[in-house]
Image: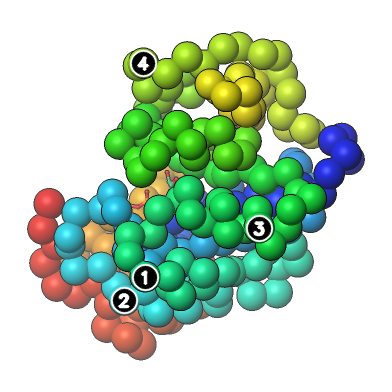
Amino acid sequence: MDGRNRRIAIFGGTFDPFHNGHLRMAVEVLEGLSPADLYLVPSAHPPHKPSWPMAAAEDRLAMASAAVAGIKGITVLDLELRREGPSYSLLTVREVSKGNPEADLLFLIGADAFAEITTWHRYRDLLAACDFLLLPRPGIAPEASFPPGILIEPEGNHCYNLPGCSYRLPGGRRLLCPVLPVLDISSRSIREKVRRGRSLRGLVPPEVERHITDHGLYRGDEGG
Ligand code: ATP
């Protein structure tokens, strides 16, 4: 293990629903970085999502929990459900940091989300609060997701045991861009399939498909 401190990866998301793209990325990070823990943090009140009829936070938490049950090294945290107000990632990173003051924190973020990071609550503080690891999304090259106006400097190829390259963020934190499989799965496409009565096989863990069916999720129209 390189680095002196315990490493904790934080994977936040709306997870509406949690799908195999999320799951595979979590497993790739577990195997490639060997963090002491990978925390999955479903967002209770995602500040960035339009107000479509999302599944209740409790359903999203239950689906993520069922999907990773028994995977050693992944823990689902309900801390954003226990917090009032918008689920700002900065608050989550600070809360995890407070509980693990000796750990190096690494925030996993998809390239689509990173491209919009300047719209996030106190994004400069967030970028300075922990390291980041960019997850590939289809059709977005890592550098193409770097928002204009933020100085991100190439550093080398420090991605723990994964191939890839690394950058320095303003404030000195690292942005890791490992080479990972690009999986063309999104929660939106899953919700769309449910509405059309299509199979979800191969796209979500069986436990998630069961929860969607048993609770009648995603049958209504979606705005946006
Ligand atoms: P939606 O389609 O509703 O916008 P989503 O599939 O992007 O949702 P989120 O819950 O918003 O899912 O994603 C949480 C995090 O996981 C984000 O940083 C997102 O970019 C990333 N992510 C989602 N799907 C994938 C995927 N297939 N591969 C890599 N990263 C992903």
Amino acid tagged 3 = Lys
How crowded is the residue under tag 1: few (<14 C-alpha within 10 Å), some, or many (20+)? few
Relative to 191, is 135 above or below?
Answer: above
Residue at image location 14% in from the left, 72% down from the top: 220
Residue at label 1?
84
Residue at image location 74% in from the left, 62% down from the top: 73
* Disc assigned to residue 56: 2
The secondary element bearing badge 2 is classed as: loop
The secondary element bearing badge 1 is classed as: loop
Residue at label 3?
98
x then y, percent, for residue 95: 58, 59
Dots 1, 3 in contact, CB < 8 A: no
Relative to 131, is 221 above or below?
Answer: below
Residue 27 visible in the displayed image? no
Amino acid tagged 2 = Ala
Residue at image location 51% in from the left, 72% down from the top: 78
Q: Is mark 2 within 8 Å of ligand 1?
A: no
How is the rendered protein coloured? rainbow
Relative to 216, is 111 above or below?
Answer: above
How crowded is the residue under tag 3: few (<14 C-alpha within 10 Å), some, or many (20+)? few
Front: mark 4 or 1: 1
Front: mark 4 or 3: 3
Residue at label 4?
149
x then y, percent, for residue 148: 35, 16
